[in-house]
Amino acid sequence: MYLLRLIILILFATHISAFNGGPIPEKVMKKAERKYGGLVVSRFLEYNTLLENSKHFSLHQKLQSVNNFFNKIPFKSDVKNWKTDDYWATPLEFLARYKGDSEDYVIAKYFALKTMGVDTQKLYFTYVNSKKFKRPHMVLSYFITVDSDPFILDNINPEILPASQRDDLTPIYNFNPTINTQDESQATTHKNWKKLYKRVKRNKL
């Protein structure tokens, strides 16, 4: 295990960014280890390995592998996890704490797929109501074209299905961070995104 860790750390040591554009660098791992303990490093290394393997993946394999990777993390509400009603965790925080709510799954999947080269203009944060749990929920939607039936990446249902086959979800609206909109209903989402993106760029743990 030590040899594997050493090889991967050397392989990625030249990168200075994490989820915003590359694998997690060694200095971030060391900082996380001091704050959260040794287990967090193994999670970060597993993520870096996923990125390396994804170079040979098809689009579907990228979507499925990222969905599976983050869905292993247990769900926990913001109130219990962060002592606040609504907090958008950075992917590093999500992996380090190893718990989070639906927004955290979506954010981590979005940045991972971005790093894998998936077109972010086709990735949308989709607010829905979950009929099963009777509460607001967020999923990541992938649109092949603007008018196509999107594929849903979700922590409730691990199977990636077209939205038309997710009768348990009632859509509210879509949000894409790369597309400017004046829709007032998305004002809070834009605000949360801007705060999150600043923390992501700082590799906030």
Image: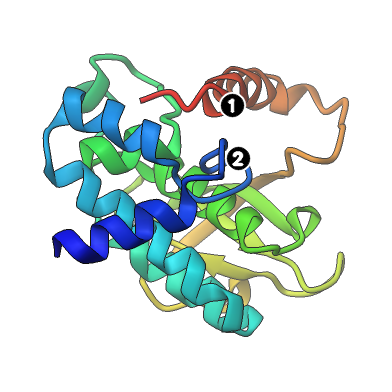
Percent from the top left, x then y, of residue 173?
68, 44
Q: Is residue 106 above or below residue 77?
A: below
Between the C-alphas of marks 1 and 2, the distance is: 6 Å
Residue appearing at x 49%, y 60% in the figure: 169
Q: Is residue 103 left or right of residue 120?
A: left
Residue appearing at x 69%, y 24% in the figure: 190
Q: Is residue 193 above or below residue 17?
A: above
Percent from the top left, x then y, of residue 121?
80, 54
Label 2 SS: loop
Q: Is residue 59 left or right of residue 168?
A: right
- Toward which corner of the image does residue 65 lie, by quadrant? bottom left
**Amino acid type shown at disc 1:** Lys
Name the quadrant of the C terminus. top left
Q: Earlier in the sequence, mark 1 or mark 2?
A: 2
- Front in this rendered view, residue 84 or 6: 6
Residue appearing at x 53%, y 74% in the figure: 54
Percent from the top left, x then y, of residue 105?
41, 49
Residue appearing at x 55%, y 67% in the figure: 152
Task: Find out whether the residues at labels 1 and 2 contact each other: C-beta distance under 8 Å.
Answer: yes
Label 1 SS: helix
Is residue 197 among what the camera can see?
yes
- Kindly identify which residue carries mark 2: 20
Is residue 166 among what the camera can see?
no
Q: Is residue 57 left or right of residue 37?
A: right
Q: Pointer 2: residues within 10 angstroms few (<14), some, or many (20+)?
A: some
Percent from the top left, x then y, of residue 119?
77, 61
- Front in this rendered view, residue 138 or 33: 33
Specify the label residue 151 is tagged with. Answer: none
**Amino acid type shown at disc 2:** Asn
- Kindly identify which residue carries mark 1: 201
